[in-house]
Image (tube, rainbow, N blue to C red):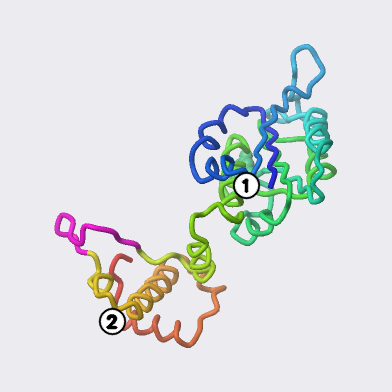
Amino acid sequence: MRIDILTLFPDVFGGFFAHSIVGRAVAKGVVDIRLHNVRTFTHDKHHVVDDYPYGGGAGMVLKPEPVFEAVEFVKQDAVLPSVHTVLLSPQGRLLNQSVVRELSGYEQLVLICGHYEGIDERVAMYLANDEVSIGDYVLSGGEVAAMVVVDCVVRLLPGVVGSEVSLVEESYNDGFLEYPQYTRPAVYRGLEVPSILLSGDHKQVARWRRQQSLMRTAKRRSDLMAKAVLSDEDKKLLSDALQNQVTEGI
Ligand code: 6GU
């Protein structure tokens, strides 16, 4: 996959792409990430990228010309058939794991980071194919959102996450929160790891984990629970847990 990021602040991505799982994917050649400074696509002496909003109001608006030209530039050597251009903005559709899976299916992503109080609407309407937000809060720019998108997408690419087993397990847990994890020591400052995990009884461990997963989701994320499809076994695990108050760690 190739990812082109259009931004006014390319420097902020450096450390992130050098380290992390994303960095490993870049080193392995699974993904080719290219940063482009939108300011270099201006033609005036002072490299102006923003201007006052038509109709008045506070703040500045990112001009369309450098953004259109930057996208045209990254597309010109695009030999890849499926290019998807995404504007990152708080007005976009909300990112979730199914959007991430969708984005991971393209051969090339072009991510446009908005800035200032906004970006000329013609970018969203006529240049981008997609507009994505990472949550209901306002960031000062799209860079952090672009890092979030890149991280989530790249870890789904084949050969990036060490064993694909963890992805399989993740999809099994799809729609529910993860169960709690523990590692050694078995007792730390008097705090014990749930004994079932030390039992060596794999069937009971799996049952406990599923139960914890269901309980956590029910308690913390009623929105996910409302959408969830529970098997008969899940329903039994949940009602058993509620009855016995098997709520360790919840
Ligand atoms: Cl993608 N951009 C900005 N500026 N704020 C956001 C966002 C994006 N997603 C949530 N808040």
Camera-nearest residue between 238 and 97: 97
Helix, strand or loop under label 2:
helix
Q: Please say if 225 is above or below 167.
A: below
Instruction: Report whether residue 223 is seen.
Output: no
Residue 2 pos. (x, y %): 70, 43
Residues in magenta? 181-192
- Label 1 Cα neighbours within 10 Å, binned few <14 / some 14-19 / many ≥20: some
Give the structural element (helix, strand or loop) at label 1: loop
- Give x and y (percent) for residue 162: 49, 55
The residue tagged 1 is: 30
- Marks 1/2 in contact by CB < 8 Å: the verdict is no
Residue corresponding to mark 2: 244
Front-most of residues 14 and 242:
14
Q: Is 140 or 37 nearer to us in this picture? A: 37
Most frequent secondary structure within the magenta stretch: loop
Q: What residue is rendered at 43% in x and 73% in y?
A: 214
| Residue 233 lies in the magenta-colored region | no
Dividing the image into 4 quarters, which one contains the C terminus? bottom left
Instruction: Judge by depth and name the residue closer to the eye, 175 or 76.
Output: 76
Q: Is residue 35 above or below residue 206?
A: above
Q: Is residue 175 left or right of residue 133?
A: left
The three-letter amino acid code for the residue at tag 1 is Val
Q: Say whether residue 182 is magenta.
A: yes
Q: Position of residue 152 (x, y in %)?
A: 57, 51
| Quadrant location, ligand no. 1 | top right
Query: Which residue lies most toward the top here?
Result: 45
